[in-house]
Amino acid sequence: MSVSAVLLLALAAAGCAPASAPGSGSGSGPGPGGEDSAKNWQQASEKIVEQTLADEGIPGAAISATRDGEAWEFVTGEADTESKTPVEPGTPFAYRSITKSFTGTAILMLVDKGEIGLDEPVATYVEGVPSGDLVTIRMLLGMRSGLPEYTMSERFQALLNQDPTREWSDSEILELAFQQPMAFDPGTQYKYTNTNTVVLGQVLESVRGRSWSTVVDEMLLGPLKLDSVDYPDNRAKPEGTAVPYQVHENDELETLPDVRASLFSAAGGLFGTVGDLRTWAAALGSAQLLQPKTADERFAHASPTEGDPTSPLYDQYGLGMGEFHGWIGHTGVGLGYQALAMYHPDTGDSIAIVMNGAGADPDVPAKMFEKLLAEWDEK
């Protein structure tokens, strides 16, 4: 099976062979509900995580959450099935499309500073974007630009199959995207694409004169002390990163090649631990780094997602982040990794999930999240 086919999730249904090993959880003491209450929801949650991995055939996962002031972290399964290396709390995973929320937040922070205008055309900042005089920064953030998806380019798929570990550049990715026709007139529809956020990475570079990842590091990672979060670009992935696996219909695991983070760039290239991802979920959902006026813009004109069959599982998508059952955050999936980061603005609860396996269903973390919410409501 081709790597590009895996990337596009053109696979049969996921297998259901058990792939997880016993896990271990950790907390920081009883919350308002008392020690017994905390143990109840944590133990129930652990069962949901382990059952999901068994049902989906995913080797390993980590979850970090806060609920009613109670912190909880749980790891289970294997980061590397060949060496039998277990998942640890400090094991890095690829965040994939959750990277979009980092890039989008950096853009919004520069809106706060008056360096970027939400309704300015992207041509103000980046040359060569099709309909760049009509596509605005707001449209890029909200997935309403009409720019074509670069991973759908036949040339991109051919290059990826020829050498899955090849190095990529943003200019190459965008050239492959822009050789395709626009999907629709700018601003008229919602269509989730990676191209939008790669262009936003170029906007960051144009405005600040440094790579998008350096801007994100300076503006987000440093202030929030997200020490594990890294963009490897064309380097090897961070040491100790969980091995990515594709789960096939016949219950077999395929070890996937270590594609370069540059393949996803500002749309999906970040790696990090589950603990740092939960910290990010809280910062993202609470708009910790934004001025109130800009924070209000995030969902002022959000798009329902049901019209896009390829969209991740959100109720609506705003500016670089989604809303799901009242929670704000982002999910990510691609080439052997799945992840979720969510925060509830009313309760202050937050959750992060990372996995090192993917099959036909690109929404496993979101569906597991729904099961966790149902269990938490009962507890």
Image (cartoon, grey):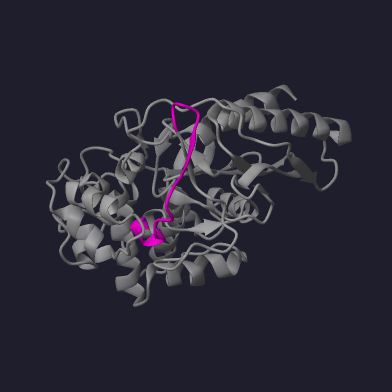
Q: Is residue 250 magenta?
A: yes
Asked if residue 62 can be seen in this view, the reply is no
x 73%, y 39%: residue: 23
Question: On the picture, is 290 further left or further right than 118?
Answer: right
x 69%, y 51%: residue: 88
- Rendering coords of residue 278 (x, y %): 62, 50
Q: Residue lying farthest front? A: 82
Of the 4 image quadrants, the one containing the C terminus is top right
Above/below status of 340 relative to 287: above
Question: On the picture, is 4 further left or further right than 245?
Answer: left
- Rendering coords of residue 75 (x, y %): 69, 44
Q: Is residue 79 magenta?
A: no
Asked which quadrant contains residue 376, the reply is top right
Q: Residue lying farthest top? A: 378
Above/below status of 67 relative to 44: below
- Rendering coords of residue 69 (x, y %): 76, 44
Q: Main secondary structure of the magenta part?
A: loop
Asked if residue 157 can be seen in this view, the reply is yes
**Considering depth in this image, is 215 or 256 the residue closer to the camera?**
256
Of the 4 image quadrants, the one containing the N terminus is top left
- Rendering coords of residue 120 (x, y %): 25, 60
x 71%, y 33%: residue: 46
**Considering depth in this image, is 242 or 371 the residue closer to the camera?**
242
**Considering depth in this image, is 132 or 332 the residue closer to the camera?**
332
Above/below status of 282 relative to 324: below
Question: On the picture, is 33 further left or further right than 202?
Answer: right
Asked which quadrant contains residue 205, the reply is bottom left
Q: Which stretch did the figure color magenta? A: 248-264
